[in-house]
Amino acid sequence: MEIKYLNKDDGIYAELYGELDEYSAEYVRISLDDQLITNCKNKTKLILDFSNVSFMDSTGIGILLGRYNKFSKNNINMYIKNPTSYVNRIFEMSGIYQIIPKVG
């Protein structure tokens, strides 16, 4: 898993590459938490781009929900963008879009 960040005026844009599973979960958790601490002052949103994520399991859902809770407590909204069809199906089955909205 690799994450590339783009810091814009209103938020942080994170492009995820690879697989989000039990092997990469710790890296993703630490990386996103680090962004919250170092780059999210005066930011209102975090957009996670899943267009390059080839696989995700329930561990990935857990990581996203945990980060959602942390970012929400800091008044930062999270959004999911461009999920692959496989990842989109996982998101739909889990109901995560009711918590973390999907944006175009």
Image: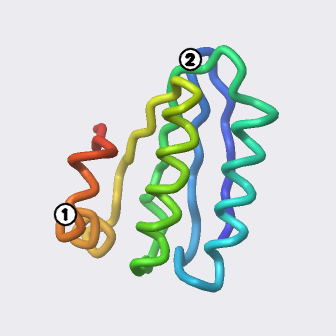
The picture places residue 55, in percent across and down from the top left corner, at 43, 80
Q: Is residue 17 above or below residue 74?
A: below
Q: Amino acid at mark 2?
A: Asp
The picture places residue 15, in percent across and down from the top left corner, at 57, 52
Q: Dot 1 corresponds to which residue?
A: 92
What secondary structure is marked by label 2? Answer: loop
Mark 1 neighbour density, 10 Å: few (under 14) some (14–19) many (20 or more): few
For residue 95, side relative to residue 49 (left or right): left
Quadrant location of the C terminus in the rendered image: top left
N-terminal-most mark, 1 or 2 = 2
| Residue visible at 47% across and 57% down in the picture | 64
Give the total number of marks visible in the rendering. 2
For residue 3, side relative to residue 16 (left or right): right
Q: Are the residues tagged 1 and 2 within 8 Å (C-beta)? A: no
| Residue visible at 29% across and 46% down in the picture | 99
Q: Dot 2 corresponds to which residue?
A: 10
| Residue visible at 47% across and 50% down in the picture | 49
Q: Amino acid at mark 1?
A: Glu
The picture places residue 76, in percent across and down from the top left corner, at 52, 28
- Inter-mark Cα distance, 1 to 2: 27 Å
Q: Is residue 53 above or below residue 80?
A: below
For residue 58, side relative to residue 47 (left or right): left
